[in-house]
Image: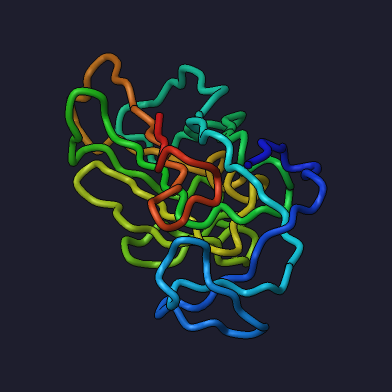
């Protein structure tokens, strides 16, 4: 039987028979034949104590606190995109020290990327330059890789050192330029966050990667 439990606790230890290796060989302990089975179908009489946990359902992440921003045509200073922006994920926020490894953030223009849209560091004293293929550096700490920054698309992939606070410091220090001499009166940028919960990883529960 399985007991569904949360991260704060678990069921009492259960008892289980110790089985052999993948080839069917008994690793240790005396053996007996299973009733009604071939004599080679055996299991150990030794008893081990185990805890059984059932993984919860993975939930989608989100990007919140995004507000309308006003830019000047071909302004030499970058626009701070999301000064109060927050990336949230229920599973990854269970601990402030949890790594956001494999989480990706992609920003591009709604309706199709435009090469006139350029994504830069708003404050280079905090966030390093966003060079495609280079490191994401926030406050002198490498927290991931700039997977793409060209053609009007910015994709950031976070690494082992990334945490909730550091990911949001990166988000809040992103800057934007529009290089067009005739930019639209308004445009919308879309933020896509993927929690990186790929098959074989499953750190955040069942259901695979979630994005929004």
Q: Specify whether 93 is left or right of 176.
A: right
Give the quarter of the image for residue 32. Answer: bottom right
Q: Is residue 143 among the parts visible in the rendering?
A: yes
Q: Quadrant of the C terminus?
A: top left
Where residue 21 sits in the image (x, y, percent)? 49, 78
Give the quarter of the image for residue 85. Answer: top right
Q: What residue is shown at x 61% (from left), y 29% (from top)?
A: 84
Q: What residue is shown at x 20% (from left), y 35% (from top)?
A: 113
Q: Residue furthest top?
A: 185
Q: Quadrant of the N terminus?
A: top right
Q: Specify whether 57 is left or right of 209.
A: right
Where residue 60 sits in the image (x, y, percent)? 48, 31
Q: What residue is shown at x 54% (from left), y 82% (from top)?
A: 26
- Which sits in the foreground, 54 or 154? 54
Is 54 drawn above or below residue 39 in the view shown? above
Where residue 56 sits in the image (x, y, percent)? 58, 36
- Which sits in the foreground, 200 or 84? 200
- Which sits in the foreground, 46 or 105? 46
């Amino acid at each position: 039987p399985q007991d569904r439990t949360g991260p704060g606790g678990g069921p009492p230890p259960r008892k289980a028979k110790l089985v052999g290796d993948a080839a069917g060989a008994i690793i240790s302990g005396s053996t007996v034949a299973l009733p009604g089975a071939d004599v080679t179908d055996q299991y150990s009489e030794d008893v081990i104590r185990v805890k059984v946990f059932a993984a919860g359902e993975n939930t989608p992440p989100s990007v919140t606190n995004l507000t309308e921003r006003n830019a000047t045509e071909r302004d030499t200073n970058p626009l701070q995109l999301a000064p109060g922006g927050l990336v949230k994920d229920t599973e990854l926020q269970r601990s402030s020290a949890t790594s956001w490894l494999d989480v990706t953030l992609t920003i591009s223009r709604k309706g199709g990327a435009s090469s006139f849209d350029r994504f830069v560091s708003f404050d280079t004293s905090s966030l390093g330059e966003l060079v495609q293929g280079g490191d994401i550096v926030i406050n002198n700490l490498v927290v991931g890789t700039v997977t793409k920054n060209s053609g009007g698309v910015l994709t950031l992939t976070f690494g082992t050192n990334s945490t909730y606070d550091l990911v949001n410091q990166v988000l809040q220090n992103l800057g934007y330029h529009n290089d067009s001499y005739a930019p639209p009166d308004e445009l919308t940028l879309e933020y896509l966050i993927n929690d990186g919960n790929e098959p074989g990883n499953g750190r955040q529960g069942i259901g695979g990667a979630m994005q929004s």
